[in-house]
Amino acid sequence: MRIIICLTSLALAFLVGTAWAQTGRIAGTVITQDKREPLSGATVEVLGPALKKKIGAVSRADGRYAVENVPAGTYTVRASFSGYRGETVRGVAVTAGTSVEMDFRMTVAPYAMGEMVVSASRRAENVVDAPVSISKVDAKEIERNSAGNTFVSAIKNVKGIDYTQRGILNESFNARGLNAVLNTRMLLLIDGRFSTLPSGAGGPIDAGDPISKDDLQDVEVIVGPGSALYGSDAVAGVISITTKDPR
């Protein structure tokens, strides 16, 4: 039995060593240009004609990232983060069995960027590049069109949404065609965190929204199945709320 375990371990070590000998890796740190602070959640992509598909990684809390199993060759490495200028380095040579250190210093974008969304693919991207149709309601529209203290009445005209006014402050919404007393089929995200009750009872939120509309930056509405990205709670769609920076 011990002989079999030893042989299996040797075989796995040989396979890992062989894969490492045929490929390399690109690793480094993503930090801010001004304060030299690490950026968590920055996307680093490796692009090149030798790749059949895009490969990349997301930076950790300490700003470190690592793209493994990169075939030997010359590539373009691009780092992006919402609110910062994208950084691109071309001509990065990767040799089999070695690791290339590539650091990025991200600069805050001093100009108004195109409208960005995060709910379609769970990463920041331009709204016109998103793979699904997204309706985005900004803070001004929420303030202008919300009757109460929540965003609910501001999305009543969003395509694919059924809105019901049951009292002065009692509002509800659901995906069109699935309307019911309780909204249990649309997932609510607040700053990327799941905010739907575990039981689904009561749905995401109504007039009891814990966030004042004055603190809302925008609301993204995706109508349609979202379970592949967000789990079984997103049967009919996703409501993604982003709050304003405290400063």
Image: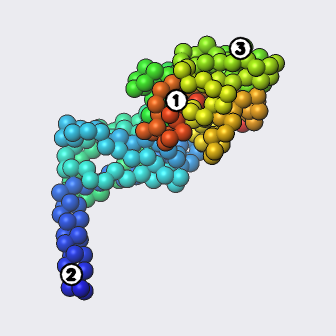
> Whole-Å distance between the Cαs marked 3 and 2?
70 Å
Front-lying residue, 161 or 33: 161
Give, as a three-letter code, the residue at label 1: Gly
Q: Earlier along the polypeptide chain: callout 2 or callout 1?
A: 2
Q: Residue sitting at 22 percent across and 41 percent down?
A: 51
Q: Which residue is mark 3?
A: 145
Front-lying residue, 93 or 66: 66
Q: Is label 1 in a helix, a strand or a loop?
A: strand
Q: Residue sitting at 61 percent across and 18 percent down?
A: 162
The mark total stands at 3
Q: Position of residue 17 (x, y in %)?
A: 21, 66
- The image quadrant where one finds the N terminus is bottom left
Q: Which residue is mark 1?
A: 237
Q: Is residue 232 left or right of residue 174?
A: left
Q: Is residue 126 visible?
A: no
Give, as a three-letter code, the residue at label 2: Ile
> Whole-Å distance between the Cαs marked 1 and 3?
22 Å
> Whole-Å distance between the Cαs marked 2 and 1?
50 Å
Label 3 or label 2, whichever lies nearer to me, is 2
Q: Position of residue 178 (x, y in %)?
A: 56, 25
Q: Is residue 168 visible?
A: yes
Front-lying residue, 10 or 30: 10
